[in-house]
Image: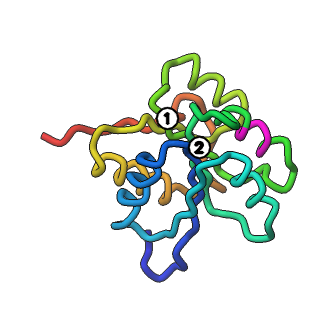
Amino acid sequence: MDNLQEPITLYYVDDDKDDLDIFEIALQPLTGRVVLFEIGADLLASLEMPHLPAIVFVDLNMSSFTGFQIIQYIRSKERLAKLPIVVLSTSIDFRTKQTCWELGADFCIAKPRQIHELTTALQYAINVDWTLRERSFASFQFVYEKKS
């Protein structure tokens, strides 16, 4: 991301405290600030405020609101129609990806095992021009490139 730009704000909801901490650590080398939510209802309430984040990252497997419900809610609001939603989850089989796609998520990242891989995926998501990116199922999931 260009250093001359204002830092962007990202939202991430996950009911696993460790995953929230890992997300925050992975974001440190990048430009941006993150607001973390352990409860889906808190994220949804924050989206009613005047200032919206640049991207919402959503875990799928949560107890109060699932990520699927959060995606569906966001897409049901006209004001939030263009807000990029990135799924960040361990459950990324074909059916799950298809469901997220159909509900209106813009991108999907399988939770990596290494923090540097998450940093790479976050950097990719931050650098995407979501206003110009064509939404296609073929480019829906982030693929980690192994360095040799």
**Structural crowding at the residue carrying mark 1, measured as other residues with C-alpha within 10 Å and reported as few (<14), some (14–19) or many (≥20):** many
**Which residue lies under the disc numbered 2?**
58
User: Measuring 74% from the left and 48% from the top, which residue is drawn there?
Assistant: 41
Q: In this picture, is 56 found above or below 5?
A: above
Q: In this picture, is 53 found above or below 41?
A: below
Residue 104 on the magenta span: no
Secondary element under disc 1, as helix, strand or loop, is strand
Q: Are marks 1 and 2 in contact (CB under 8 Å)?
A: yes
In the image, what residue type sits under mark 1?
Ser
In the rendering, at what x and y percent does residue 50 appear?
Answer: 80, 70
In the rendering, at what x and y percent does residue 11 appear?
Answer: 59, 57
**Which residue lies under the disc numbered 1?**
89
Viewer-side residue, 68 vs 2: 68
Q: Quadrant of the C terminus?
A: top left
In the image, what residue type sits under mark 2?
Val
Task: Count the numbered circles shown.
Answer: 2
Report, in whole angstroms, how far the alpha carbon at label 1 lies from the one at label 2: 8 Å
In the rendering, at what x and y percent does residue 10 appear?
Answer: 57, 61
Q: Quadrant of the N terminus?
A: bottom left
Drawn side of residue 55 relative to residue 23, left or right: right
User: Measuring 63% from the left and 46% from the top, which residue is drawn there?
Assistant: 85
User: Measuring 56% from the left and 70% from the top, which residue is drawn there?
Assistant: 8
The span picked out in magenta is 70-74
Q: Residue furthest top?
A: 95
In the rendering, at what x and y percent does residue 115 appear?
Answer: 30, 49
Q: In this picture, is 59 found above or below 127?
A: above
User: Measuring 71% from the left and 39% from the top, which residue is drawn there?
Assistant: 71
Viewer-side residue, 44 vs 86: 44
